Amino acid sequence: MISYDLTAFGAPLERNERPTPQPQGSEVLVRILAAGVCHSDIHIRHGYYDMGNGKRLNMGERGATLPLTMGHEMAGEIVSAGPDAQGVQVGQRVVVYPWLGCGRCKVCARGQENLCIAGKAMGVFAPGGYSDHIIVPHARYLIDIGDMAPEQAAPCACSGLTMYSAIGKIDPAVLKDEHVVVFGAGGLGLMAVGLLKALGNPGAIVIEPDAAKRAAALKAGAAHAIDSAAPDLMKLVKAAAGGAVWAALDCVGTEQTVGTAIAMLTKGGQLVQVGLFGGKIEIATPSMPMKALSYQGSYVGNLGQLQALMDLAKAGKVPAIPIDARPLDQAEAALQDLEAGKVVGRVMLQPARS
């Protein structure tokens, strides 16, 4: 088995070759066909999140240990299974749900493994998809992808699931009637644009500094794409929204984007943040009740939500995002390009077939 592993925070990935693991008990061995390179992988590689004012949340404090095979967007085919695995078909193509919890706490029992404080997310705290094979602990974490291309199915496990869950937190009446503002047109933002369209929204208003990404957003179905550097940004966005901004999705998560989003919301407006770029914000406390604002964080999604999303995707209702397919051995270069802002859509790593 070949993988590209993080062996020291801040260092380049290293190629590692070892025997392919054999599944035990309820485990399932999956051959990776496509693994996404997510912006979260950049934070993991650096070993910290920027908490603002010079403070950092280190990956070690979150429970990460090295060496680590990153990659939490995975699609592949089942190779073999342990003796206790049920409902497994060799050759079946699946997407992997990576946001595993401890499996024992009340949160996990409620079906919210992604919120488990002792989480074991694959590619974050356990081996992930920058590899040609992966051991999945149980068949329930595998969802059939039907005729979908693996490189289109894999992003559903993170960028798709994240935005599906975040959009689900918006007032249904607002979602039906009002344009939703989306900050950022990277992998998350483009997925948000497509899902909003699929879920019946009038169309996203995307705020993005990069012209190529704005063009991609419009191609994906955005109603408007506005340069974040525009001097009259607030006026332009409110006009595009019909005079009032009722809901915003922040796929960036900086001091500037969060601050701008809160400032443009109308009375009763909602901001849902999923971006993790970092920083710290100040909020005038009287403004929250006086404007009846809602500011909520959203972290990926649960297994049931991914199953629902895959039903939409297999039915052809989720527009495809731009894919840059690369060999697995370009994992390091892909990370560097993503951090440099050179990627439109999603890089998908594809291991060589043996």
Image (cartoon, rainbow, N blue to C red):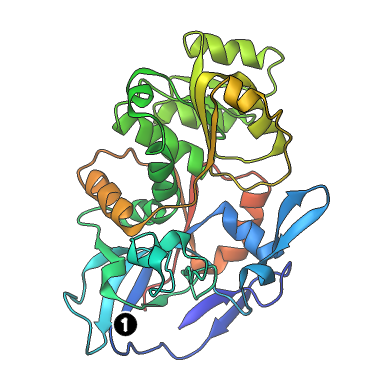
For this rendering, which residue is in front, 286 or 71?
286
Which residue appears at 48% of the width and 68% of the height?
121
**Left or right of residue 245, residue 9 in this image:** right
Q: Is residue 58 visible?
A: yes
Residue situated furthest right in the rendering: 54
Question: Which residue lies under the disc numbered 1?
Answer: 27
Q: Does residue 20 lie above or below 183 as drawn?
A: below
Across and down, in percent, residue 114 comes to: 44, 60
- The number of discs equals 1
Which amino acid type is marked by label 1?
Answer: Glu
Q: Does residue 167 lie above or below 323 as drawn?
A: above
For this rendering, which residue is in front, 258 or 85?
258
Which residue appears at 58% of the width and 25% of the height?
289
| Quarter of the image where the C terminus is located | bottom left
Q: Does residue 131 lie above or below 245 as drawn?
A: below
Which residue appears at 33% of the width and 75% of the height?
30
Which residue appears at 66% of the width and 46% of the height?
277
Across and down, in percent, residue 2 comes to: 49, 80
Image quadrant where residue 45 sits: bottom right
Across and down, in percent, residue 214 comes to: 54, 28
| Quarter of the image where the N terminus is located | bottom left
Across and down, in percent, residue 98 comes to: 41, 65
For this rendering, which residue is in front, 137 or 115?
115
**Is disc 1 surrounded by few (<14), some (14 to 19) or many (20+) residues within 10 Å?**
many
Label 1 SS = loop
Q: Is residue 34 visible?
A: no
Image quadrant where residue 218 sits: top left
